[in-house]
């Protein structure tokens, strides 16, 4: 878009579009490894390409509304579907990325916690999520900023993934609260696992952005695998559109 040509009859010829179409990579597949809570090297899949991550045309407004309607109709009436569509288009993010995050962070807000609909990720700590606009834009900015950071890096290694350090153990305490000590006493090997954390090499900028936002691939306190669980939600969204 910054290129120009000199016309032999005088003046400059400047492009009005890049000429690049925003299309998905339908067969993209990559793998990465990490050490799980039991000390075993584990191989996992990742199927979102860098092009897919910023494909803001991946879903129409009607498709986003249909997905939200199938998960929690209030997401449509409260303006979340429209906000996701508009702001993903403005900031150039695939709306499926944000929808999957909405599904993972608060279970489509079926619990009524709309003020924390998208969670809070590294790279930005918005003070409130009391309306759809602030939460949506804040989440998008974190994801896009981390994506751009990943695109500019020579190395896509993320440090201290799966890390819940002493003495505060914020992540585990958020789950167990006053029963934190009981859980830790029963699971000392998991406490050590999370105290140490680990470095993980991401396969592309898309994975780098998502793993920066939620830096967990294995979370023993909830017996979950957040990155793979999120990816499963992302991959299931098309099923909502096929259902009657």
Image (tube, rainbow, N blue to C red):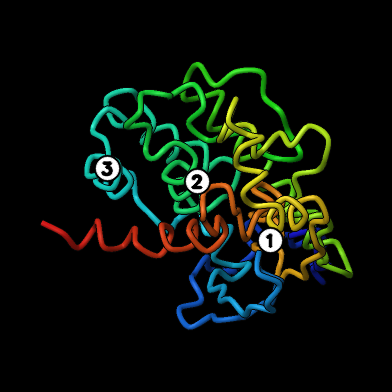
**Rendered view: 76 above or below 12:** above
Callout 2 secondary element? helix
Name the residue rendered at 66%, 35% in the picture: 181
Q: Secondary structure at mark 3?
A: helix
* Residue at 84% over, 58% down: 159
Secondary structure beneath disc 1?
loop
Q: Earlier in the sequence, mark 2 or mark 3?
A: 3
Q: Is residue 67 left or right of residue 11?
A: left
- The x and y percentages for residue 227 are 57, 59
Q: CA distance from mark 2 to mark 1?
A: 36 Å
The residue beneath circle 2 is 101
| Mark drawn on residue 142 | none
- Can you tell which quarter of the image residue 189 is in? bottom right
Mark 1 — residue? 15
Report the Cα–Cα distance between label 3 and label 1: 42 Å
Between 20 and 173, the residue placed more toward the observer is 173
Report which residue position mark 3 lands on.
Answer: 71
Indicate left or right for 124 with 134 as reference. Answer: right
């Amino acid at each position: 878009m910054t290129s120009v040509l000199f016309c032999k009859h005088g003046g400059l010829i400047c492009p009005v579009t890049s000429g690049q179409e925003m299309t998905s990579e339908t067969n993209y597949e990559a793998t990465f490894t990490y050490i799980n809570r039991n000390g075993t090297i584990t191989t996992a899949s990742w199927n979102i390409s860098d092009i897919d991550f910023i494909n803001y045309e991946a879903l129409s407004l009607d498709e986003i509304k249909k997905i939200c309607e199938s998960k929690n109709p209030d997401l449509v009436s409260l303006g979340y579907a429209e906000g996701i569509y508009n702001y993903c288009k403005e900031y150039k993010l695939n709306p499926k990325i944000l929808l999957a995050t909405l599904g993972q962070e608060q279970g489509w807000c079926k619990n009524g916690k709309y003020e924390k609909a998208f969670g809070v990720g590294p790279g930005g700590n918005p003070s409130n999520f009391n309306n759809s606009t602030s939460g949506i834009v804040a989440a998008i900015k974190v994801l896009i900023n981390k994506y751009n950071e990943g695109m500019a890096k020579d190395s896509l290694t993320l440090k201290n993934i799966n890390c819940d350090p002493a003495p505060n153990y914020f992540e585990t305490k958020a789950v167990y609260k006053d029963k934190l000590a009981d859980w830790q006493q029963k699971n000392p090997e998991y406490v050590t696992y999370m105290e140490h954390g680990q470095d993980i090499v991401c396969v592309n900028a898309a994975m780098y952005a998502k793993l920066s936002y939620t830096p967990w691939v294995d979370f023993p306190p909830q017996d979950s695998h957040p990155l793979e669980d999120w990816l499963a939600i992302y991959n299931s969204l098309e099923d909502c559109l096929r259902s009657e």
